[in-house]
Image (spheres, helix red, strand yellow):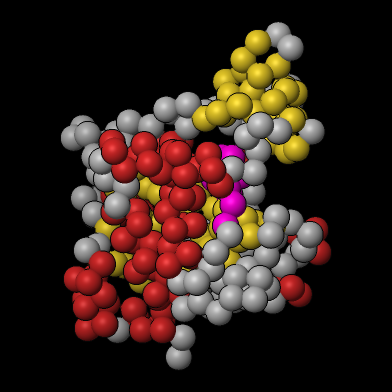
Amino acid sequence: MPRLRLLAHPAVRSAVSLEIGHQIEYHELIDSTQDRARELAGRGFDGIVVADEQRSGRGTHGRAWQAAKGTSLLASWVLRPAPAAPALVAALSGVAIARALASLGVEGASLKWPNDVQLEGRKVAGALAHGTSDGSGGVLVLGIGINVHQRPGDFPVELRDSAASLAVAGRDVDRLALLARLCGELRGLGDAHAWSAALAEWRERSTLLGRGVRVTLPGGGVVEGTATAIDDDGALLVHTPSGIERIVTGRVEPA
């Protein structure tokens, strides 16, 4: 049995929860860990929802996150009180993912704004943050998906040039170990100094900073220029002939 599925056993789940410092709710199959985490957050839950398979996982811009059973690490964290800059948390979670991978021997992860983690130019992981107010500091649900065991033929044809997994990249990683390392790295982002260091690392790992980019905005507008930075709220700053454009959301590609 793959070790992540051992979380279905209460005694194992309790031991792992104690080890990583988070309550865990585990599902063999669920529509979406993020939807479930948001539901539980409204009941005071403070922990992680983990699944072996999702029916309706989502990525950025409303795109589906497709993953066959047993192939991905799929988890959503309930963070309270909610950090002041959810978009920055989503971006810096990419640093946490890259660090967790490095601790398991997977070096060379790069980051594409706003929240993609890439190996050899192809996406292997992503994060999605959703904040809500609950009258006591708010709640942030941070969903993370990491492609671990997929083979090339497991991806839809239209994604095979842009998506990959740790296995496709030649790395054999245990999902339960990855979950534990990722929890530790996310916990390590708990203060302003850690955020500053993570932001500097994000810049070092960025695939876009200093390069020409084309940004397609949600309303269909287009911004072209040079990506120069991300600000303290996680927005991408693009230098254009008419000035600096602050991009909060949009599809960004090299120009």
Asked if residue 130 is positioned above or below residue 228 in the image, the reply reads below
- Quadrant location of the N terminus in the rendered image: bottom left
Q: Identify which residue is drawn at 35% across, 57% down.
A: 185
Asked if residue 189 is positioned above or below residue 223 in the image, the reply reads below
Instruction: Determine if residue 28 is in view.
Output: no
Q: Tell which of 94 and 42 is nearer to you.
A: 94
Q: What percent of the width, then of the height, locates residue 198?
A: 41, 43
Asked if residue 114 is positioned above or below residue 47 in the image, the reply reads above
Q: What percent of the width, then of the height, locates residue 210?
A: 66, 31
Q: Is residue 28 left or right of residue 151?
A: left
Q: Identify which residue is drawn at 28% across, 36% down.
A: 192
Looking at the image, the residue that sits furthest to the bottom is 1
Q: Identify which residue is drawn at 56% across, 71% down.
A: 148
Question: Image quarter for residue 193?
Answer: top left
Q: What percent of the width, then of the height, locates residue 222?
A: 75, 23
Q: Identify which residue is drawn at 32% across, 47% down.
A: 189
Q: Tell which of 6 and 57 is nearer to you.
A: 6
Question: Image quarter for residue 72?
Answer: bottom right
- Quadrant location of the C terminus in the rendered image: top right
Instruction: Determine if residue 234 is in view.
Output: yes
Number of marks drawn: 0
The residue range painted magenta reads 109-116
Asked if residue 196 is positioned above or below residue 226 in the image, the reply reads below
Does the magenta segment cover residue 37?
no
